[in-house]
């Protein structure tokens, strides 16, 4: 939303402090759960869903309830799933009058459809028919049942489970929960002592929150993170964006190699690890949320290292270590012999080629006039040095200059070489214009 509701907090800084305070409240109630609380608030900032898995009695419900209790102005839908339930448990009862005419319509008042927050306990106890019906609601934020189409108010759903049930439908449900965590019981005596202290005070219930955060403020921050706010934005530089994609691809490769090595002796097809383009695109919102929570308007290269929050299951140390290895491997590779500098130069070149493809008339002008960014000026300076100002400004000469730049560019790593090869293909397309 980008309406008057944002006036509750006149500055971004106050809004950020408000959500930091909310996270601190939750951390003060739950012992040794700082990382999953951080992940949960990133889910809220990005407007996504969180799945919590653990054994019975570890505090999944308490975590969800304490998080939701820090907000004011949000409706909360709570349900414990069971195999006997039908979709109307979540969407509201059927309209009997319309049912008499053969139309399936739900009376959605008080249902998940009209709630900003939802908590679904033991989600995989629900039958596949009901879970399938929930898919559109979780992903598109819309109730789609027969001819009924209704936009939903859902911001984030937290679901809890003691186990994973794998089927075609549950895999689709899992994909809707971009953030996942396994909460393991901590048997450290001091941690148990701290938990016991909390129990003596609160008897297992949520802690009363004196000053709650307005839900409209969360919407305000979510608009910034999602790039929807008209006056506040968080920038992601091209080299950071490209680097994040390299890390994600490397991690996906590492996961699949590990799966193949661990299942080499098994017969039959083995399911690979897959990161969907949708999840990869939404990881950009997490990068902006990380920058926002650190009080920055620009995503930093080191923020990419925290993408494990969305690409791994929190609590699974082997996954997290694998992501950390992918990140550090590429940082080290590109740090050698100025790989990051080469990445910036080639991406500036890519931007120049994109402009020329969109507007071929620019090829009739001297390339030295097309200086719109520091990165692009690096390319233009090379043109001036090598061609004494760019030579004659014919279209064909400009094309030759661009091709020559790539021919003489010596990559320092396989990743840079791959980017150069892709740009050579782009220049070939430009040649045919």
Image: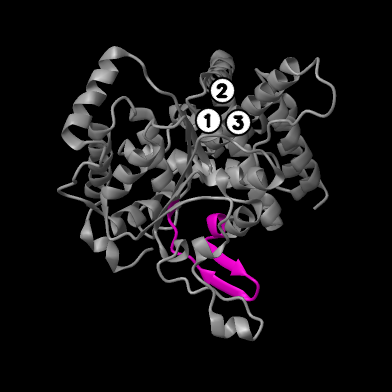
Q: Quick one: label 2 or label 1, which is nearer the N terminus? A: 1
- Alpha-carbon neighbours of circle 2 within 10 Å: few (<14), some, or many (≥20)? some
Question: Which labelled disc corresponds to residue 161?
Answer: none
Vertical arrangement, residue 73 with respect to residue 388, above or below: below
Q: Quadrant of the N terminus?
A: bottom left
C-alpha span from label 1 to label 3? 15 Å
- Residue, disc 2: 319
Q: Dots 2 and 1: beta carbons under 8 Å?
A: yes
Rendered residue at 58%/61% (across/down) = 86
Q: Quick one: label 1 or label 3, which is nearer the N terminus? A: 3
Q: Position of residue 192 (x, y in %)?
A: 28, 19
- Alpha-carbon neighbours of circle 1 within 10 Å: few (<14), some, or many (≥20)? many
* Magenta stretch in the rendered image: 137-156
C-alpha span from label 2 to label 3? 13 Å
| Residue 218 part of the magenta-drawn span | no
Could you tell whether 60 is left or right of 338 in the image?
left
Could you tell whether 119 is left or right of 248 in the image?
left
């Amino acid at each position: 939303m980008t309406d008057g509701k944002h006036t509750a907090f006149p500055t971004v800084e106050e809004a950020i402090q408000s959500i930091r305070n909310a996270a601190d409240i939750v951390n003060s109630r739950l012992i040794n759960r700082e990382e999953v609380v951080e992940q949960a608030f990133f889910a809220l900032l990005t407007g996504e869903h969180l799945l919590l898995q653990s054994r019975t009695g570890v505090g999944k419900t308490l975590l969800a309830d304490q998080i939701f209790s820090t907000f004011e102005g949000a409706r909360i839908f709570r349900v414990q799933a069971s195999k006997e339930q039908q979709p109307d448990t979540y969407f509201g009862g059927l309209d009997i009058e319309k049912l008499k005419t053969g139309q399936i319509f739900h009376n959605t008042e008080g249902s998940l459809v009209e709630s900003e927050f939802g908590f679904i306990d033991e989600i995989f106890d629900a039958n596949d028919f009901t879970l399938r019906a929930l898919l559109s609601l979780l992903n598109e934020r819309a109730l789609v049942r027969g001819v009924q189409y209704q936009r939903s108010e859902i911001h984030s759903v937290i679901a809890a489970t003691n186990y994973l049930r794998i089927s075609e439908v549950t895999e689709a449900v899992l994909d809707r929960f971009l953030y996942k965590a396994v909460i393991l019981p901590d048997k450290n005596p001091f941690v148990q002592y701290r938990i016991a202290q909390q129990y003596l005070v609160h008897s297992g219930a949520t802690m009363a929150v004196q000053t709650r955060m307005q839900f409209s403020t969360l919407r305000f921050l979510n608009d910034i993170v999602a790039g929807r706010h008209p006056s506040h934005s968080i920038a992601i530089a091209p080299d950071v964006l490209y680097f994040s994609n390299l890390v994600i691809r490397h991690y996906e490769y590492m996961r699949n190699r590990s799966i193949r090595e661990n299942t080499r002796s098994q017969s039959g097809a083995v399911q690979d690890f897959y990161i969907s383009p949708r999840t990869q695109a939404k990881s950009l919102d997490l990068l902006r949320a990380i920058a926002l929570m650190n009080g920055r308007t620009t995503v930093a290269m080191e923020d990419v290292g925290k993408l494990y929050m969305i690409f791994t299951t929190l609590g699974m140390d082997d996954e997290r270590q694998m992501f950390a290895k992918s990140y550090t491997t590429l940082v080290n590779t590109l740090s050698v012999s100025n790989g990051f500098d080469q990445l910036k130069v080639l991406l500036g070149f890519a931007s120049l080629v994109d402009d020329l493809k969109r507007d071929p008339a620019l090829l009739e002008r001297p390339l030295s006039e097309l200086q719109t960014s520091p990165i692009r000026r690096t390319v233009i300076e090379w043109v001036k040095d090598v061609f004494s100002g760019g030579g004659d400004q014919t279209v064909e000469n400009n094309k030759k200059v661009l091709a020559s730049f790539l021919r003489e560019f010596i990559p320092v790593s396989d990743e840079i070489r791959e980017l150069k090869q892709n740009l050579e293909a782009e220049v070939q397309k430009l040649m045919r214009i």
